[in-house]
Amino acid sequence: MRSDAIKKGLARAPHRSLLKADGFTDEELARPLIAVVSSRNEIIPGHLHLQTIADAVSAGIRMAGGTPAQVNTIGICDGIAMNHEGMRYSLASREVIADSVECVVQGHRFDGMVLIPSCDKVVPGMLIAACRLNIPTVVVTGGPMLAGRDQDGSETDLNTLFDAVGAVTAGTMSEDKCKWYEDSACPTCGSCSGMFTANSIGCLCEALGIALPGNGTIPAVYSERVRLAKHAGMKVMDLVANNICALDIINEHALHNGMALDMAFGGSTNTMLHLTAISHAAGCPVSMDDWDAICQHTPNITRIAPAGPLHIEDLNARGGVAAVIGELGRAGLLDEAALTCHGTMREWIDACPTPDGEVVHTIENAYSAQGGLRVLSGNLAPHACVVKQSAVSAAMRQHAGPAQVFDSEEAACEAIFAGKIVPGAVVVIRYEGPSGGPGMREMLTPTSAIFGMGLADSVALITDGRFSGATKGPCIGHVSPEAAAGGPIAFVNDGDVIRIDLDAGTIELDVPADELARRRAAWQAPKPKYTTGVLARYAKLVSSADKGAYFG
């Protein structure tokens, strides 16, 4: 066992003494030592209950003959970090999380691990660590929050609040109604209730094979989540016994299946960033061309908020991720060479339920023949950009309009809330990329404000930053190269016409090439916004968005 390095032989007597100071017995030290890695904390609602999940995982490990040891890492809530300096740290935290898991597991030579993340950057951060460590690994996330309820019984979520802020500003909603949403939209612990980033990647863990069925959709407050956690603890012991490691599961076959599922349910655009980064860690990098190919061949068969009125609990009630996997698998759209932590992909497909036809459509009755996420490219984004096309109205799939350009999220928000955005415009927010931001901030506040003020069917938004999974409308992010790297988005002027065509997959700046060349020659790279600390280091090391904003 790996853990023999800290447990066996005369030279390890001091090590055993320290372990016995933890209360471990000789009998426990004779068994495989399993890390139970949680991001539990008291600030993020998705993480508040993770001690219960960790204790259940530990129980499962003990039942299966292992010795668990709980350790922790950090987490950041994107909702709380939104629209201020804190958001610069969110994406950067993914790399910190990956590094911290690698350090603690390698430093103590664990034989296997169960990862217990929740929320946007913790799940991919832990998955990157799993690929680096390549030991037997199972993921069990904290699970989704239940949806809130409006006064008329309609489902609500955190995005309802962001939209409400825009509506109050526009004078179309009272502050009293906004306060109702504030008090009711987030009623339980768990990751926010729509197909936002955390739940998207929680579901993708199933498709990647690193989590048990049900992981992505069983609500955080259900006892079924606790039972799933116990089974995850038992399952990692099976993997240890059979020497099945993380990269036996997360490889090119699994990544294909993860990307296909992403397209089928139209997950957050952030999943394209994170899966791309995970692919680098796994040694089988995917490109924007790979994403585009998957989009062309995978139909969109379910639409969960923000793409529709339903929430994760509704998908859970109709078969969960398995219902989508089954439909894709029976259509030959999944890679059956993939191995999961609970068996072969073929075995899982055979056991999956059929779609209910309402929450999960059949392929014959798909919402669209293409996937819910789309890659665009053109002279404004030579290395691509992305949009959640399943959440874009038909009226805005093609759009051309004059640019209104802002060099920060703050400047854009000031203009939006002041009523300065012209119907038909294309709002451009730049210098918010991975390096230039730094940190590639999410733009949920400006996008929700535009929606709440009734401009979503006339105004598009483009940024080298990124968007929350809750974003809806013609919001195009991850523009690469970013402005700080001298990408064409840096050379857009107010009034320039930008043409967007989601059907053709194009985004073009209607400016002659010689004029763009003149602007490029006159451009000067901005000075770094941070010269010390985490963000200074991040800005120097991070790759472009089309590479997953990955360190390496």
Image (cartoon, rainbow, N blue to C red):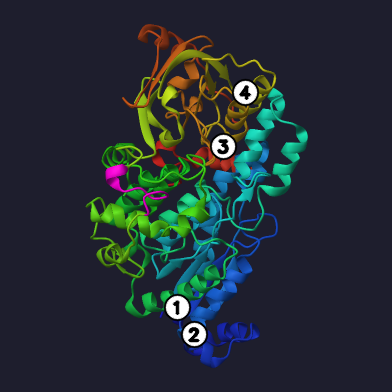
Mark 4: few, some, or many residues within 10 Å (few <14, many ≥20)? many
Tell me the kind of residue under disc 3: Glu
C-alpha distance separating marks 1 and 2: 7 Å
Q: Is the Cβ of the residue at disc 1 closer than 8 Å to that at disc 2?
A: yes
Tell me the kind of residue under disc 2: Met
C-alpha distance separating marks 4 and 3: 13 Å
Does residue 438 appear left or right of residue 334 in this picture? right
Q: Is the Cβ of the residue at disc 3 closer than 8 Å to that at disc 1?
A: no
Q: In the rendered image of this protein, does residue 348 appear above or below residue 487?
A: below
User: Does any portion of residue 295 appear in the rendered image?
Assistant: yes
What residue did someone put label 1 on? 234
Q: Is 357 within the magenta?
A: yes
Q: Is the Cβ of the residue at disc 1 closer than 8 Å to that at disc 4?
A: no
What residue did someone put label 3 on? 442
Tell me the SS state at disc 3. loop
Q: Residue at x 66, y 54 (%)?
A: 44
C-alpha distance separating marks 3 and 2: 42 Å
Mark found first going from the N terminus, 4 or 3: 4
Nearest the viewer among 133 and 186 is 186
Mark found first going from the N terminus, 3 or 2: 2
Q: Start and end of the magenta stretch?
A: 356-365
C-alpha distance separating marks 4 and 2: 55 Å
Quadrant the N terminus occupies: bottom left
Mark found first going from the N terminus, 3 or 1: 1
Question: Magenta span: helix, strand or loop, mainly?
Answer: loop
